[in-house]
Amino acid sequence: MQLQLPEHFLSANLFACEKVLLEKDGVASIIRVFDAIHFAVPVGLSPEQGKVDMNLFAQIKTDPEYSAEHSVQLYLVRPNGDRVSAGDPRKVVISTSVPGAAGGFTVTATIGVVTSQIGVHHFVLAVEGNDIARTAFTLVLQRPESTGEEKQR
């Protein structure tokens, strides 16, 4: 699927990670970006009852002179193609605090992904209903002889 940035948008990046830190100076740090999550289903539960929490970090950059408000939405796309909302739509204001620097916005979210499907999933960031960024990750069911602890890599 080809993604296209709206006019005045310079870049759009989306990462799935373990943690997002917001530093005192307002700069975000993303910790442990991953491409696969290994999980075990607790005894007595089905995969549909399991959930893996993860964090998303999106950073969008725009032309320095561009200032606007937009509606943004995160989605989860399952291996079978189902697309589900990963939270409520948000309004963001595009601006810059440094004259001549690129403007933009960041979006962070903590998402609980139900482990009902294993395989390659995608998170998608949409602006005004148009997909502008996506990232893939894989849910991997651990074998029964594993320790049962969730791990990310």
Image (cartoon, helix red, strand yellow):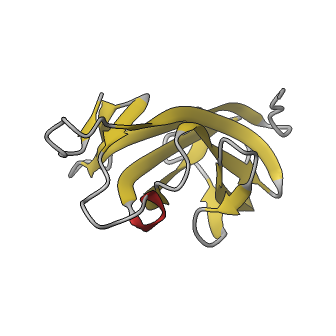
- Where residue 68 sits, quadrant-wise, is bottom right
Q: Residue at x 80, y 34 (%)?
A: 5
Q: Residue at x 52, y 56 (%)?
A: 116
Q: Residue at x 36, y 56 (%)?
A: 53
Q: Report if residue 150 is visible in the image.
A: yes
* Quarter containing the C terminus: top left
> Left or right: where does residue 65 sit relative to residue 142?
right
* Quarter containing the N terminus: top right
Total numbered labels: 0
Indicate the position of residue 4 as horizontal and vertical percent values: 84, 32
Q: Report if residue 28 is visible in the image.
A: no
Q: Nearer the viewer, residue 1 or 133?
A: 1
Indicate the position of residue 102 as horizontal and vertical percent values: 60, 34
> Left or right: where does residue 126 sit relative to residue 88?
right
Indicate the position of residue 17 as horizontal and vertical percent values: 37, 40
Q: Nearer the viewer, residue 143 or 19?
A: 143
Identify the residue at the far left of this view. Answer: 147
- Where residue 32 sits, quadrant-wise, is top left
Q: Nearer the viewer, residue 27 or 17?
A: 17
- Where residue 59 sits, quadrant-wise, is top right
Residue 70 against residue 29 in the figure, above or below: below
> Left or right: where does residue 36 sit relative to residue 130?
left
